[in-house]
Amino acid sequence: MNSRVEHIIREGRFDKERLVELLSCGAEDSKPIFLEAAKVKKKYIGDAVHLRGLIELSNICSKNCLYCGIRRDNKSVKRYSIGINDVEKAIQFAIVNNFGSIVIQSGEITSGLFARQIEQILIKATCMSQGKLGITLSCGEQSKATYERWKIAGAHRYLLRIESSNKKLYYKIHPNNQAHNFENRLQSLTDLQSCGYQTGTGIMIGLPEQSLEDLANDLCFMRELDIDMCGMGPYVEHEQTPLYMLRKHLLPKSERVFLTLKMIALLRIMMKDINIASTTALQAMVDGGREKALRAGANILMPNITPGCFRDDYALYQNKPGTQEEAEDSKINMDALIKRAGCYPAYGEKGNSQHFAQRQILS
Ligand code: 5AD
Ligand code: SF4
C-alpha cells in the first residue's frame, strides 16, 4: 500500500496538487481511495440506489458540440421528438414501476414552443403522480425566465454538465461562438441554483488533451459551486463527429474507465452527501461499468424508459447500451445490477439530494 495516498486520505485535505497525486496513482495504490469512498457512501448515503426513469424526449439540437453524435450538423441522424401520448405512457411506466423520479432529457432547443412543450409535460407528470414523482430536467442552457417557468410547472432538479471547467479545453471540444459560450454555461448553472433547483453538473473524462490537472480542477470546481448532484462519465468517441479525428490521442478505454471510477470515488469523499449518477457511458466502455460506479460511490441509476422505437436515434456516442431494449427489460437489468453491486433499489422514493436539503436547513 502507498502510505502517501493513505496519509492524504486520512488528512482529508483535497487541494489541487493532492488530487493530481491521487489521480495519477495506479490500481494497487488507489485502493485506499476506493475503500474510503465506500466507507463515506455507507455512512452518508447507505445502500439505497435511487432510480430515475430516463425519457430521451428529443434528439433535435441547435448546438454543435464537437464530441456529440446528435450535434446539429450530423445529417445522418434521424431526428425525432416524442409526442405527448408516448411521453405520458413513459411517465405512467415510471409511476407503475415505482421509480420515484423521472429525468426528461433533450437536445438543446430554446424556442417558445419547446418551453411550452416541457411545461405541459411537467404539469402532466405532476398531475399523473399527484406530486409524488421527482422530476429532473436536462434540457440545456435556457433563459432564467424559462428555468423559473419550468420550476413553477413542477421540475425539482436540473442537470447541466459543464463538460470541462477548463475554458481552454472547453473551446477545444465546442465551437468558439456565442451559442457555445463558456461564461453563459456558468451563468446558467448559477441561474439554476438561484431558481431553487437541486442543481447538478458533470464532466467528461478522457477527452483529448485533458490532463490530470484539468480533472483535479473539475473536482475543485464542483466543490466550489456546491453542487447537489453530479453525472460524469468517460468520453466515448463517435465517428460522425469532428472530435473523432483525435481518436489516436485518447487514453485506452480501460484507463478512461479507471479514471472515471476514481473521479467518482474522490467526489464522494469530497462531497459526502450529494447524489452521484452511475452513467450509461461507463457501460458503453466496459461490461458491468455502472455496477462498478455504484461500488465506487455513485447512488443514482437512470434506467432508460424512452419508448423502444426512438432509442437508437438518441446516440450521443457509439455502442450505447440498452438501445434495443424495451423499458421492461431495462428495469429487470437494473434490479440485477443493483443487487450485484451490493445495494438495493429504493423504489417509491424521490431520492432528493441530501446535500440540497441540508443547505436549505442551514440557510
Ligand atoms: N461521450 C460521452 N459523453 C457524451 N455526451 C455527449 N456526447 C458524448 C460522448 N461522445 C454527454 C455530454 C452531455 C450529455 C448529455 O451527454 O456530457 O452533457
Ligand atoms: Fe446538443 Fe447536448 Fe449533444 Fe451538445 S451535447 S450537441 S447540446 S445534445
Image: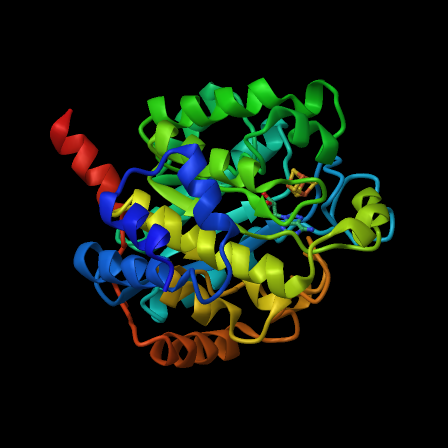
Percent of width and height locating residue 321 = 62, 69
Q: Give me the residue at 27% from left, 54% from top.
A: 351
- Position of the N terminus, as image quadrant, is bottom left
Residue 231 appears in the figure: no
Question: 278 or 207, which lies in front?
Answer: 207
Percent of width and height locating residue 77 = 81, 53
- Give the number of callouts: 0
Question: 2 or 85, which lies in front?
Answer: 2
Q: Give me the residue at 66% from left, 31% from top.
A: 169
Looking at the picture, does residue 199 appear above or below residue 37? above
The answer to whether 290 appears left or right of 309 in the picture is: left
Res 309 → quadrant:
bottom right
Q: Give me the residue at 73% from left, 61% from top.
A: 318
Percent of width and height locating residue 359 = 20, 32
Residue 224 appears in the figure: yes
Q: How is this picture coloured?
A: rainbow
The answer to whether 243 appears left or right of 194 in the picture is: right
The answer to whether 342 appears left or right of 53 in the picture is: left
- Position of the C terminus, as image quadrant, is top left
Res 52 → quadrant:
bottom left
